Image (cartoon, rainbow, N blue to C red):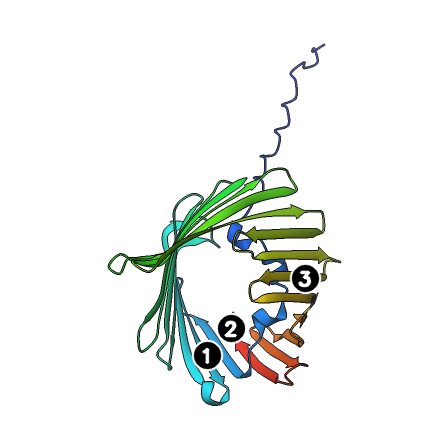
Amino acid sequence: ASRPSTMAAPAEQAPPAQPEPSVGAYDFLHMSAKNLMAQNFMFSGIRLSISKPLGMNFMAAHSIVIDGEKSFYKFAPTYVGTIRQKSQQESYPVCLGEVTTEGNVVSQVIHEPIDNLKLKFQSQSSSKEFQHGQIEADYDMGTSHVGVKLVNVNPVRGSGIWVFNYFKKITDSVAMGGDLTYQYSKGQFEVAMPSFGGRYQGKDWIFAGTVSTAGALELSYMQKLSDTARVATTLEFSGNGLAANAGVQYSFNSGVFRSQITSGGSIVGCLERKLQEGITMLLNGSMNHVTGKSTVGVGLVFGQ
């Protein structure tokens, strides 16, 4: 009789470890709460937007805004290069632009030359002058994040703004960091303003706070009530006074509704609803109960 096999069964291989979520940038410390605020999505008048892909790497978007004297047309092209292709959904460089009939031109280039290092360039100009230029470098190490930002730096005039920030995960729930803003103008002034901040993240909520030596204080709180509902509040105190906001976001099968109330007496509501595949309707309105001023916006978006 043959002897039964004594060969051991191959050991099951453990699944590869999943990378920990990134701690994020110090600049985005309050983003989870601010993204819920309806004012970020508010516009007035009538808006029509059409976006269409033109090949594998290029997309063009056209927008018409009708709002009295502020009416304009905007052309916004987007190019996604293939110099560095990390996946089917992520490829670099990314080049974005905006041109309006008012003469405003905005450009942005994002590139990731190596893993975890992102470089950004932004510029903005009007028909009369160059208004804004910004260069950023962000290095994400997973549990920590380092950022450097140069804003309107002009070596000829000897002026500009430099920003350095660092954010570090202390525990699974706690992250802390700070930044240093250095602003100068040759022969006029030179000032450095540090700030410090932290974030505590629970299972369904996030609390964050920042304070600067200039006397500014910012607090934010976001609570996830369910898979479809979230609420948030922000509090900002500075030399200009106190500003508080409370917002709610509710998602449903075909859209998102956001509402916000501010300490300045404004109530804002924004509805984004998909009518059918490729067509989205936008409705929003706001009213300030102190000044009595109100605005209404209606829009249609065709394409992605």
Residue type at mark 3?
Thr
User: Does label 2 or label 1 sit earlier along the sequence?
Assistant: 1
Under circle 1, the secondary element is strand
Q: CA distance from mark 2 to mark 3?
A: 33 Å
Q: Residue furthest bottom?
A: 68
User: Does label 1 or label 3 sit earlier along the sequence?
Assistant: 1
Q: Quadrant of residue 39?
A: bottom right
Which residue is nearer to you in this view: 130 or 96?
Answer: 130
Residue indicated by mark 1: 63
Q: Residue furthest front?
A: 188
Residue indicated by mark 2: 303
Which residue is nearer to you in this view: 135 or 118?
Answer: 135
Quick check: 142 above or below 25?
above
Q: How many residues crowd around disc 2 within 10 Å: few (fewer than 14), some, or many (20 or more)? A: some
Residue indicated by mark 3: 233
Quick check: 2 above or below 79?
above
Q: Residue furthest left?
A: 156
